[in-house]
Amino acid sequence: MATSIPDGIILPVMRVDLRSDTVTLPTPEMRRAMAEAELGDDVYGEDPTVNRLQERVAELLGHEAALFTPSGTMANEIAIKVWTQPGDAILVDAESHILHYELAGPAVIAGVLVETYPITDGVFNLSDIPPRIRVADDHVPGTRLLCIENTHNRCGGTILPPEWMPELRALVDRHQLRLHLDGARLFNASVALGVPLQAWSRWADSVMVAFSKGLCCPVGSVLAGSREFIREAHRVRKLLGGGMRQVGVLAAACLVALDTMVERLADDHARAKRLAEAIAELPGFSVNLRTVQTNMVYVHTARPALEVERALAARGVLCIALDPHRLRLVTHKDVDDAAIDHAIRAFREVAAELSA
């Protein structure tokens, strides 16, 4: 999900880009590691840097094996295709990234029916899932896969409580489903609650984590699961054009991120909270502060969100008008305290201008 700078906007000297944590630039240490990476042909499994990354992520997530992919979307779509057959059904929540931002990939790539269960502010009821599970017969497809998301993008960066995971595991086992975790920002959840990644990941049959968001890498996600799952995932990655060669130049940045970028996510969370609290006090804006749990702030606007987006861009603050009356702001490494101060001033100016 991305947006460009609105036409006709001339940005002032200070530019605060809150559109996404995907706009982050790699650190000097990452660039050095990329330049010096030990390389091989990854399609043949011979890139030592990629292999180190995959082994390390598999261990962190509590799974047997892992696979480096160009994007989180590809990793999600690989998992869906591995776990299903054409004509099956899968369940995702009604606000999920898989449903809204992956170009109908499950239908196009895996040939499956996507059905939804309700979610509000990142919270869903386990009791809502069983009635939506189909048992295959001569008239209906069978449900094969349940997908969950943590942190949850469209719900404001909210965290799926880790204590829910044993119940989710029991539910999918009871109904003979597989469980896939879209953990694009799982590191944010881990840092925010101070619990290990495995509090969520070990309960899922497959899990994806992204490195190109808050961890600041230029490219890449990793998909983890059993050795058998990853063997098939490797084939599907090739099918989708994701077979990469000397891709250790990218995996090297991810290894640096694991060592240097994880704990600093707490700074992003603190800045998001400060920004949210300041905006919530302004006329014409409202923020559900309960959902500001990590590095995202969703702002409801009295005036059209696109109008507010343009007014902020004119003051050097970039964000996304996600819905007609909702803005998304995302903090990250390249937004420091001074940038947050500037963003707050810009919101105050816009609030005064639009309410005049």
Image (cartoon, rainbow, N blue to C red):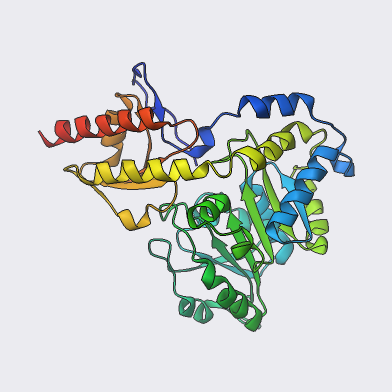
Figure check: 7 above or below 252: above
Which is more toward the observer, 115 or 27? Answer: 27
Figure check: 305 above or below 117: above
Picture quarter with the C terminus = top left
Which is more toward the observer, 233 or 261? Answer: 261
- Give the total of numbered labels: 0
Residue 225: x %, y % from top left:
74, 61
User: Is there any visible trace of residue 230 in the rendered image?
Assistant: yes
User: Is there any visible trace of residue 76 in the rendered image?
Assistant: no
Looking at the image, which residue is at 60% across and 64% down?
199
Residue 344 shown left or right of residue 270 in the figure: left
Looking at the image, which residue is at 74% across and 55% down?
58
Residue 325: x %, y % from top left:
28, 47
Which is more toward the observer, 73 or 33? Answer: 33
Residue 116: x %, y % from top left:
49, 67
Which is more toward the observer, 256 or 305? Answer: 256
Residue 231 occupies quadrant: bottom right
Figure check: 22 above or below 293: above
Residue 171 occupies quadrant: bottom right
Residue 277: x %, y % from top left:
28, 46
Residue 176 shown left or right of residue 213 in the figure: right
Residue 336 shown left or right of residue 211 in the figure: left
